[in-house]
Image: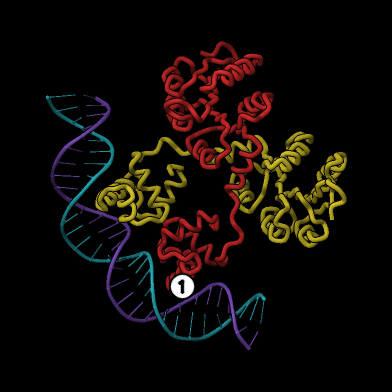
Chain colours: A red, B yellow, C cyan, D purple
DNA sequence: AAATTCATCACCCGTTTTGGGGTAAGTAAA
DNA sequence: TTTACTTACCCCAAAACGGGTGATGAATTT
């Protein structure tokens, strides 16, 4: 369906002013064609096979299906379409949900207009365009909490426990006795003030000890 | 120790040519002061309290301690120093290790020189500077594999199992019988060709089903 | 209309794991 | 020297696990 080498873009954005601004902005650039623009996700999904977009700019807050739910549905029909979320929300939960569902980028609407075009170029170059704060959010999600009450050995044990391994498997892997692992885990439970494996893992993950 | 409002930077890079290029490049910009430059991590760590850097540009391949090991040691002494890895490696394992150890950014040396200054500005603005390919790597790490052999329900069960929960806890949470969960898990093991919880979790994580 | 998949539930068996209790030796750090 | 950490052992009872077999209804596909 491609006319030439230009990338086909669809826009899903319920605010007409913003939607039209995006269309205008993108049309000004010869490298991109706006295949279509929608004010809701359902219509966009219905027309995917006609639009055959390379890129989809997706708002989150929409009437009906929200933008995050829409991502996997789009990827199911057009796996090679790159979805970039464009929203006002910098909420970490939304960001991670969007990325888990398959978003290739996450932009906030307070960006300068030129940044949108730059982001499209970054996508083409195999990148993952993100707004400043989003990138920090994403990178921070990898950071461990280094003020953990647990010792290095306890963290090691807890990590293996969190990967589903049994006491004896952990013991074998660390070349110590199973009873030693039990001792460590008892101390872990004491320090984290929990009474089971699941609680310990949950608390440790939440606190980013592991 | 700050002379004025300029940010203090240290550089850890064993290649003298690259190191000096960075120093020159940064000194040209009035917003940054090169507090020091080292060809190894040990020396940099030893002088941290004198250098009091706001930012540390860190190579990975170094004589002695490597750059990734150095990150937590730096953060332990100067928690507010932002470490940005600057390396030739785009290897995903190294990237994730660096971020887990506390890196605030990850740049590859093939970037245009101006990008380095831009990255420093991004850091100041609360961002996390990353090269194009690194950003994609990081974002892709969130993506789930949607060609899983497991049903939606099985994935749900497996995710809860992977969070350390017992069969009965999972059953309660999903409002079904414990026997139902057992059945699901048996089917999961069949499909993943494994025979234990730990194996199932490992395989599912590796294949990015969960 | 028939076949298949999926989610649900049930009972069996035996083994392993888990959580909790206590105790204690050796080492390293403060 | 006291404390913290790692290591290891004992006991016990409850829970969880892995594997087997079978069955039902709903939904989907063929």
Question: Residue most toward the top?
Answer: A3
Q: Tell me if residue A143 comes above or below residue A63 in the rendering.
A: below
Residue at 27% from the left image edge and 53% from the top image edge: B178
Instruction: State the residue in front, B129 or B148.
Output: B129
Residue A6 visible in the current orientation: no
Q: Where is residue C11 in the image (x, y as percent from the top left)?
A: 15, 57
Q: What element carries label 1?
A: helix
Residue at 80% from the left image edge and 56% from the top image edge: B52
Residue at 44% from the left image edge and 17% from the top image edge: A47
Pick the quarter of the image with the C terminus of chain B.
top left
Query: Is B62 left or right of A90, judged from the image as shown?
Result: right
Q: Tell me if residue A113 comes above or below residue B31 in the rendering.
A: above
Residue at 33% from the left image edge and 46% from the top image edge: B188
Instruction: State the residue in front, D23 or B202.
Output: D23
Residue B179 visible in the current orientation: yes
Within-10-Å neighbours for mark 1: few <14, some 14–19, many 20+: few
Q: Position of residue A70 (x, y in %)?
A: 45, 29
Q: Tell me if residue A50 comes above or below residue B185 in the rendering.
A: above
Please count the marks in the image: 1
Pick the quarter of the image with the N terminus of chain B.
bottom right
> Disc 1 designates what residue?
A183
Chain at tag 1: A
Q: Where is residue B136 in the image (x, y as percent from the top left)?
A: 59, 36
């Amino acid at each position: 369906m491609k006319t030439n080498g230009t990338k086909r873009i669809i826009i899903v954005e319920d605010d007409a002013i913003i939607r039209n601004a995006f269309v205008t902005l993108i049309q000004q650039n010869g490298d991109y064609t706006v295949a279509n623009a929608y004010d809701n996700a359902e219509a966009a999904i219905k027309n995917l096979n006609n639009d055959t977009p390379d890129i989809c700019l997706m708002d989150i807050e929409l009437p009906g299906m929200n933008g995050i739910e829409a991502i996997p549905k789009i990827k199911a029909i057009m796996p090679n379409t790159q979805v970039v979320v464009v929203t006002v929300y910098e909420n970490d939960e939304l960001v991670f949900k969007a990325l888990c569902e398959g978003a290739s980028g996450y932009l906030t609407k307070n960006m300068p207009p030129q940044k949108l075009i730059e982001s499209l170029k970054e996508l083409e170059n195999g990148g993952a365009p993100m707004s400043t704060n989003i990138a920090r959010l994403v990178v921070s999600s990898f950071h461990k909490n280094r003020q953990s009450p647990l010792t290095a050995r306890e963290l090691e044990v807890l990590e293996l426990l969190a990967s589903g391994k049994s006491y004896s498997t952990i013991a074998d892997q660390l070349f110590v006795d199973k009873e030693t692992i039990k001792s460590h885990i008892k101390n872990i439970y004491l320090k984290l003030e929990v009474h089971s494996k699941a609680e310990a893992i949950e608390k440790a993950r939440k606190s980013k000890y592991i």
